[in-house]
Structures are given as structure tokens and as C-alpha cells.
Amino acid sequence: MLALMRFLSKLCACLLKRFKRGGGRGGGATDDAGDEVVDSFDIFFELRALQIATNFFSELNKLGHGGFGPVYKGLMPNGQEVAVKKLSLESRQGRREFTNEVKLLLKLQHKNLVTLFGCCAEGPEKMLIYEYLPNKSLDYFLFDKEKSASLDWPTRFRIVTGITRGLQYLHEEAPLRIIHRDIKASNILLDEHLNPKISDFGLARLFPGDDTHVNTFRISGTHGYMAPEYAMHGYLSVKTDVFSYGVLVLEIVSGRKNHDTKLSSEKQDLLNYTWMLYQAGRTLELIDPTIAKYNADEAAMCIQLGLLCCQQSVAERPDMNAVHLMLVSDSFTLPRPGKPGIQGRGGRWTTSSSALTNTNASSTLTGATKASGGGSFVEEYSRNSISVSSIDEGR
Ligand SMILES: Nc1ncnc2c1ncn2[C@@H]1O[C@H](COP(=O)(O)OP(=O)(O)OP(=O)(O)O)[C@@H](O)[C@H]1O
Ligand SMILES: [Mg+2]
């Protein structure tokens, strides 16, 4: 499967090469592992070609606007559809560092990750060019009463499993370990068969020393996916992503946002409400009422797993290897979760080069690493896990 993915990805890259700067160049050098090294010659798209593809970045072609800038749909002359993300935020990174980071990100390939085709760094603007996904992002489906009906239980379970595999790849298997830092429903894109693909992985690397944009606080003002230790102290580890993943799993099962002020006070906060139901033995009441039929064992497992991933203590959250094992193993008994942590939200955020400060969270820190500023952005991780040994798929 990996070989097929690589082949398809290279095929796309070859087709697109014609529209990149100086296109038509022959094969690149080869690294130790026998993979073609993506040199800077291959990764660039011409600004002119992107302007034409997106109808000069017209509003009609705009797919959305996130914390990094707008995203446009583009159609290349060979018929290939692309998504062009304009990075409108100030980055301290120069062109060379940006290019180096993009080269590294191009090495990340997995069926549950959005494929990055290349970048454009002509003039003041920097852009990333991705595969275009026709169904946009999970939030469009999940939080829309009509559209969410198309997400039946098998589809939701497949989405949970796909996100798990994508995140497991980023944390444990990729040539470059990536802490995503912004796992949420709008960063899960869906292909034509509603298979999930994680987007925006590695973007934090393009803005070293500026943690704030990653979570779009300036836009949303709230962020209910954030682990308490990261929200309060800027402590970053793979378990930061595990916390966000846990919140997302509960959103997928319940079909509602992690915080919804339109609901009664006991239901407003998804984590608190789930915990209350779990303690009362009424877990299945959480399930989205638009789901007509579901597998109760799978649904209960997802809810318990979601709570486990959102534990206050970093050490009590499973790592993604353990999560994957829990999902696919028939014989595995999930540990009982304790009370979940408080999400990083609703506090006052301050922009500093090294961390975020929130006024409303407390945390228990184990095995986490403080997110560092400047160029030495450390993507450390913790292998602290509850009980389960990791799966080695022969990487
Ligand atoms: N490759 C893509 N294919 C199709 N649609 C996309 C693609 N990438 C992004 N989009 C759409 O554009 C919207 C904006 O994406 P963007 O990543 O900029 O914002 P966001 O995910 O809401 O916030 P953040 O900046 O925190 O990631 C997404 O919600 C999605 O619907
Ligand atoms: Mg995004």
C-alpha cells in the first residue's frame, strides 16, 4: 500500500512538474533509502501558474480562511485540482529555511495525510500547494444537522480509525516526528469516499518561535481542543495531540462541538458532559441522535477512549500506538478513565515567543517538553503510556 501511495504521489508530482519553475527536469538524486530526493528545483510552483489556476485568487475560488491565511481551489492546465494555501502571516523564516522545511514535509506520505505537492516562494508571499479534497473538512459534515446524517456509524468509525492511523504515522512512524498541535475537525479533510486525511501537519515548523497562530486564537478566541499543560505552560509533547484527538473523537461520536452555549448548562461542555454520563453508566446517550443504527460496543469504546485521551495527567493518556491497538484489538480491555482535564479555552491569551498563557487551567505534568521559541523548535515527545506496548510495523 505504501509503495502504491509513493507511486501515485510521484505520478502526481511528475504531472505537476510541468507547471513548476523550470519544469521538465529529469530524475533527482537518490538517498540512502533509495527514495528520490526532492530537490528545491522540483518543489517550486510558478506564481504565474498559480494565479491562472486560481483565477487570480478570486473570491469564487476561495475554500476558506484559517489562522495562516486563505485557501484557494486551483485547476492546473493538466486538469489536476489543487488547494493553494497562502501563508499571509509574518514568518521570521527566510526563503531558504522555508524551502528546507517544505522539503522535509514533502517526505511525509500516508493515506491519512493530505498530500503536499510543493510550494511557491516568489515575491513576498509564500504558499503551499496541496491535493484538493472535494468534501472539504469534517466540521462541514459533523456540525451540520442535514449533512451529518450522511455520516453513519461505520463511516464515523472509519474516520476515527483513519485519523488514528494518520496521527500514529506522524508521531511514531514518519521519517520526521511531527507534533501536529492543531488537531481539530476543520483540519480533517475528507476525500470523495469520506476517508479522512489530516491537513496542516508540520505548519508549526514554518513559523518557529510563534506559537500563537497555530491555534488561531486571534480568530476564534477559544480553543476547546487544547491540552491543559500546553494551554497553561506551553508544554508540548505528542500527548498534546492525544488530548486534542480525544476531544475530536468525542465530537465525531456525538456530532456536536466541544463547547456549545446553545445547549443546557450540564451539556455545554462536551468533556464534562461525557464524564457525567460515563459515571452514571449512561454513556450511549452521548451518541449523535442522527445516527439511526450503531455498533454499541464500538461506540462505547470510542467514548471511553476519548475520555482516556483527555486525562489531565499526561502519563495517563495513551500514545497513538496504544490507541490504535485499542481500536483494532478484539481482546483488549480499556482501562477505566478518571476525570478528564480542563481544555485550554476561555482564558486570556498572551503572545510570547515561547509559550501561551491561559488563566483558567491547572495541570499535572509528566513527560512533556516546553515548546521552545526561536529556530530550535523542539518536537520532543513522551513515550509515557498506559500499559500497552507499541506496535512496530517494520519501519
Ligand atoms: N486541501 C484542501 N482541499 C479542500 N479544501 C481545503 C483544503 N485545505 C483547506 N481546505 C478548506 O479550507 C478551509 C480553510 O482551511 P485552513 O486550514 O486555512 O483553516 P482552518 O483549518 O479552519 O484553520 P487552521 O488555520 O487552524 O488550520 C478548511 O476548512 C477547508 O474546508
Ligand atoms: Mg486547517
Image (tube, helix red, strand yellow):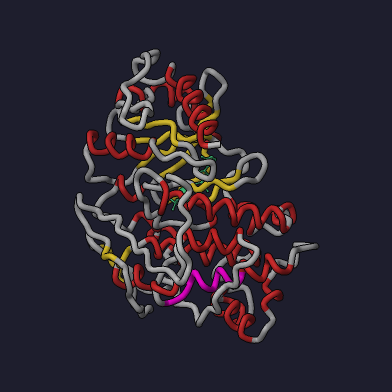
Q: Residue at x 42, y 66 (%)?
A: 226
Horizontally, residue 59 falls left or right of residue 150, namely: left
* Secondary structure mostly seen in the magenta stretch: helix
Q: Is residue 257 above or below residue 111?
A: below
Write down the quadrant of residue 176 in the picture: top left
Residue 284, visible in the rendered structure:
yes
Establish if 73 lies above or below 272.
Answer: above
Residue at (33% x, 60% y) in the render:
381
Give the side of residue 6 with respect to residue 99, left or right. right
Which residue: 50% across, 82% down? 339
x and y percentages locating residue 61 in the rendered image:
53, 34
- Name, please, the residue furthest toward the bottom: 280
Q: Quadrant of the C terminus?
A: top left
In this rendering, the count of numbered labels is 0
Q: Does residue 351 show up magenta in the picture? A: no
Position in image of residue 328 (x %, y %): 61, 58
User: Does the rendering let one see residue 224?
Assistant: no
Residue 330 in the figure: left or right of residue 73: right
Q: Residue at position x 63%, y 75% from top?
A: 263
Q: Looking at the picture, how far across and down is residue 276, in whole percent?
A: 60, 83
Q: Nearer the viewer, residue 82 or 174?
A: 174
Q: Quadrant of the N terminus?
A: top right
Q: Is residue 108 above or below residue 166?
A: above
Q: Name the residue nearer the viewer: 140 or 251.
A: 251
The residues colored magenta run 303-312
